[in-house]
Every structure is written in structure tokens, then in C-alpha cells.
Image (cartoon, rainbow, N blue to C red):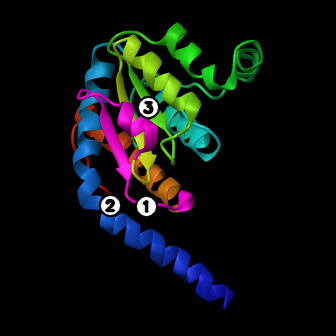
Amino acid sequence: MLEQRILQQFFDSADLMYAAAESLSRPIADAVHAVVACITAGGKVLACGNGGSAADAQHFAAEFVGRFERERPGLAAIALNTDTSVLTALGNDYDFDAIFAKQVQALGAPGDVLLAISTSGNSANVLAAVQAAHAKEMTVIALTGRQGGQIGAALTETDVDICVPHERTARIQEAHILVLHCLCDAVDTQLLGEQEIT
């Protein structure tokens, strides 16, 4: 019984990956173009999220600043959920909903990219960061799930909506990791040229 439940988790995840591959490939490609345009113009990517999505933002920033699978110069990326002094000061002095938006206001510049991660699409502090990014003339790449929520609804024509077509948080997070790996691989390919996948 336990092993069957474990197997079902794998099957459900695999089913989602197959189902989402076609619908997400175009927005992921659009996100790659946005990030490459930003980086080659000397810009940076600011990433944010809560909980598991915070871990994904950190994961993404680490792959950019360090490397993904190939050696290259570091790419400018900052996870906005990593500085505990900033987070606690902003949460205490303002409001928890402001913890990312205030950083976008301070660190963002026109042409930068905000990578906004929320499995529900309804995280208030991520939504506030999206609004702050728009005020800074930044492009937003949203990683959401379900139907995109308030974040999906707040996006403009120049933003990119990568919405995983699933209701369950765990499945959405698994897809988000794959999306981020696709993004890292494709950005490297655009910057460094093709390399055979091994």
C-alpha cells in the first residue's frame, strides 16, 4: 500500500510534466529571450517567493551567479528572500506584504527582470513586488500554478506568464524546478552556443 502511494506520486508528476511540456515551452522560450535581453544589456534578475518558492528563487540565483552545467562568467541575479536583516526590518517597520516590493524599489532598474514565484498566484508580497517592478519599467516573469491567480491577472503584455496547469502545490513546485532548469539551460545556450545534452 505504501509503495503504491509512492509510485502514484511519481506517475502523477510524470503525467503533469508530459501534459505541461507543450503548453509551457512557448512561455519558457519567451522568458529566455527576456532574460537574455536583460543580461546582455547589463541588467539583473531579481527573484522572490515564499516557502518552497523562496527556495526556488535561491536555487535560480545560485545557478546564475555560479553556474548551471557549463562554465561561464557569473550572471547577475539576486534572491530577495535571503537577507534576514532586510526581511525582518521591512516586515517589522512596514508590513510583510512589502518585503519584496521595497527591495525591488531599491535594487531594480528599468530593463531588469523580476522572477516572481507563487504556486497559487495569490501571494500578496509577490504581487506587490510585481506592481513595484512595473513601476520601475521591469519585465516580470511569473511562475504560478492553478489559473495564475492575482499575479497572473496583474501581468502586462510585455510580461511572461508561466502557469503550471495543476491544482496541487507539490506538483506545481516540481514543475517550477524543471522550468527553472530549462530557463538556465536555454540562457546558457543563447549566450554560449549549443552543447549536447548528456
- Tell me the amino acid under the disc marked 3: Leu
Residue corresponding to mark 2: 20
| Circle number at residue 115 | 3
Q: Position of residue 22 (x, y in %)?
A: 23, 59
Badge 2 marks a residue whose secondary structure is helix
| Circle number at residue 166 | 1
Residue 188 in sight here = no
Q: Depth check: give the residue in front, 60 or 166.
A: 166
Earlier residue among tags 3 and 2: 2
Q: Depth check: give the residue in front, 112 or 119.
A: 119
Q: Position of residue 34 (x, y in %)?
A: 27, 28
Quadrant position of the N terminus in the picture: bottom right
Magenta residues, start to end: 148-170
Which residue occupies 54% across, 34% down? 62
| Circle number at residue 149 | none
Q: Is residue 47 left or right of residue 113?
A: right
Q: Nearer the viewer, mark 1 or mark 2?
A: 1
In the rendered structure, are the residues bearing label 1 and label 2 in contact, judged by CB atoms less than 8 Å apart?
A: yes
Marks 3/2: CA–CA distance: 20 Å
Tell whether position 37 is magenta: no
Q: Is residue 158 left or right of residue 84?
A: left
Residue 154 position (above or below residue 20)? above
Q: Position of residue 136 (x, y in %)?
A: 39, 11
Count the numbered circles shown: 3
Marks 1/2: CA–CA distance: 9 Å
Earlier residue among tags 1 and 2: 2
Badge 3 marks a residue whose secondary structure is strand
